[in-house]
Image (tube, coloured by chain):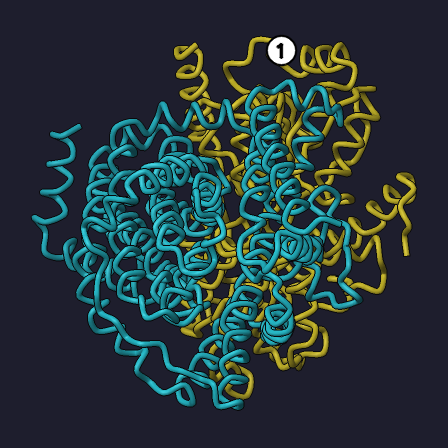
Amino acid sequence: MIENFLLGSSALFGDPYTLAIFVFGVLGGMLFGAIPGVSMLTLAAILLPFTASLTPAQGVMLFAVIYCTGTYGGAITAILFNIPGAPENAPTAFDGYPMTRKGLAGKAVGAAVLCSAIGGVASALVMMAATEPLAKWAIRNIGPPEIFALVFFGLAVASSVGGRTIWKGWMSVALGLIIATIGQDPVGGIDRFNFGFSDLAAGIAFVPAILGFFAVSEIFVQAEKTARGRYEAPPVNMEFPSFFELWQQKIAVIRSVFVGFFCGILPGIGATLAAFMGYGEAVRWSKNKESFGKGNIEGVISSETANNAATGAAMIPLLALGLPGGALTAMMVAVFQMHDLEPGPLVFYNSPDLIWVVFAAMFYANLSILFIGILETKTILYLLKIPFQFLAPLILLLASIGSYIGRGLVLDVMVMFGAGIIGFLLRRSGYSIPGIVLGIILGKIGEQNFAQGMQMVHYDLFDYLSRPVCLILIIAGTLTLASGLHKAFKANPA
Amino acid sequence: MKLQKKIAASLVTGLLVIGASSANAFECKVKDAEMAKPGGFPDRALTMIVPYGPAGGSGQVASAMAEAVTSLTGVSINRDHKSGGSGTVGMTAYMAAPADGYSVMEHIDDAASAHALDSSRPNPATDLIPLVISQVTFSQIYIRTEETRFTDWDSFVAWVKAQKGKATIANVSKEGSMERVTMSFLTDATGMEIQQISFDKGAPRYGALLGGQVDALYEQPGDVRKFLDSGDFKPILTIFNERPGVFADVPTHREKGMDFEPLLRFRGFYVHKDAPADRVEWLKWAFQRGYCEDSYQAFNEKKFMTVIDSYRDTAGAIELINTTIPQYRDVYKNMGLDVK
């Protein structure tokens, strides 16, 4: 493995053109990942035709590098402005933005930079060591029933985040789950709740909903404060987290690497579930659950470690089996095909050079997050000094473009503003915005896998629970819900 | 078992080479290598609405055709992916776009089946003008090559019947789709009771068969070519009236006593019926001639789309769509669906 890695590294750094493509991918991924709604997918779609003129190794490597740094890039705007660059950065905003409001933006961004790098490097190392056996293990042992159980387990814990009371947290998640049912159902493709709008046949898109609930509602909140003369700009603090602070979070980091890696390795799942599950597990194991959603650095660490850990893991089913884990890895299939290659078992035998250049590039791309991220952070934090009356229209403009650009539908911009207004009103009443977003994203993944899982077990609940992973996760999730219910009654007896 | 996979892989690869060489007999049916632009049209880039994502079959064919047309005419084509709702979102957006010839659309047979179920939805043969259908393919049933419980169609049917409804097959999710309707033909004809597992994306669907989460897979050969090349999957039934040369050793549904007309997957390019006639003629030439470009032919060959005749000009496309719609309508009525 080490010899192959060194060969891949020398191929990467030995050719100036390949190195230039690597640097372009690193910077481009960070930049596009940081622009709300535009995302690394836009960059990848723009670059796709141009990869035909590159060598196969350069083309696939470019996309792999964009995937690594783009996943991190969205964390910055999530933390500073409550605008997640992509759905996988949404949990980062849960605690990252409250930290910014408390004047701890430097610590939050610093933690995101470091933990994205750690998560990415760790998963790149595992990817290099055991791609084939891990991919085969995952598809044999984890199917839709297990993925639904995992989602249920994650929802059970994270549902209490951010609400004024546990009840309000749960109701927020329920609202998110209801919103997730808009659009065609995942079994029969039958239209539901689209109120005659054919554009709603695909459901509520994640990006406009996230931008609305997070960014637009936040602008309304701050605008109200400004109108009442109570607005205070967040203090800008460049202080990074100390070594001791980060060392205290070592368990959270290790746990999130595992969680992120596990979610990333599942075909069709990817970094979004990884980030939410990583965050959920941080809440589950914390002794101070109430602090989540209010500026707990562990929330940022868990989310960012997990989503970058998923990047290396998502390459495993792609390279070993030809099964992409998400939209960007699906585009990588097209890059392979442009060069008459197919990702899958044969690529290890037919194109080992390509594989090791990609592995090495992903390793270095994750490392570069650390160095470039620190430099970037030192400058980007100054954006917080822009007065609110200038910043708010800029954010609204960016969010509107981000909402529209995905599908080119005005409806998505309307959804964003609608979500912003609903989010603003619900926040005033103590409901949880993270809970709603959690419900929307996990609801879609969960419903689909529940439907597939039930079909697989012929709608027999006993058959479903006879799968050990399902049984354990469903019991654990149910116990978590029961414990939450007990606490809720204790805190507020009927 | 590995040896079995290697043998299967080499056999499939060998057959693919034979299939590829037979496809070399391609002859372009559009003789004019050039056509004057009517009134200067187009003097700017065209927009191609694609109602599915960029990485899937539609995204890829749209990209290959756009490249071919641009290389032929020098006119750029911007692809606008409006995915969702099994093509509904893209179709709605397209019908709302100006009918000036600058907007074209890629769509698949789902447009025909959607109209068959609900006649208020656009009919791709009358509300649109087909410029070209550039991919036509058939479906197959696949199992794992290393499967030991059954090895061919007959043993598969026998095994499924013995499971009394517990056997599973991965399929697409949309009720009334070509895949679902054909599966109902198969189960009716054989008396099999098999649970279809709904996957709306390819990767989890193929992963489910690879990992043994399901017993079989319904798919088109171009979409699983890499698994055929690697020897992981093998076809046990071809749903087509004759054996395509590449799959000469795989029986067809007719040979197995199933008497139904196979439904085909087709992907093509359309323009609004109200677009100016001279512009439509130029677009027909550009897309039909684009089909003949080397780059497009290479793409189709890679995608197994030269195994049967993939080309339909406007008249051929209208005929194919007009045959398909009543076929679906009859099936839907027999299935008890509310045909509007």
Q: Is residue B258 above or below residue A437?
A: above
User: Could you say which quadrant of the image residue A346 lies in?
Assistant: top left
Of A413 and B9, nearer the camera is A413
Depicted A229 relative to depicted A469: above or below: below
Q: Is residue A94 visible?
A: yes
Q: How many marks?
A: 1
Residue depicted at x 42% and y 14%: B7
Q: For the N terminus of chain A, which image quadrant?
A: top left
Image x and y of residue A435, in percent: 58, 55
Residue A430 horizontal/vertical position (percent): 61, 65
- The tint of chain A in the picture is cyan
- Drawn side of residue A123 relative to residue A284, left or right: left
Judging by the rendered image, the residue that carries numbered circle 1 is: B150
Q: Is residue B86 visible?
A: no
In the image, residue A389 lies at what x, y percent? 43, 89
Callout 1 environment at 10 Å: few (<14), some (14 to 19), or many (20+)? some
With B162 as the anchor, is A146 left or right in this view?
A: left
Q: What amino acid is at disc 1?
A: Phe
Tell me the element at label 1: loop
Q: Label 1: chain?
A: B
Please tell me which residue lies in front, B37 or A489: A489
Q: Give the residue displayed 20% in from the left and 55% down from the top.
A: A242
The color chain B is rendered in:
yellow
Give the residue drawn at x 64%, y 61%: A204
Q: Position of residue B72 (x, y in %)?
A: 42, 67
Q: Nearer the viewer, residue B145 or A218?
A: A218
Which residue is rendered at x = 9% and y = 42% of the image?
A10
Asked if residue A175 is positioned above or below residue A402 in the image, the reply reads above
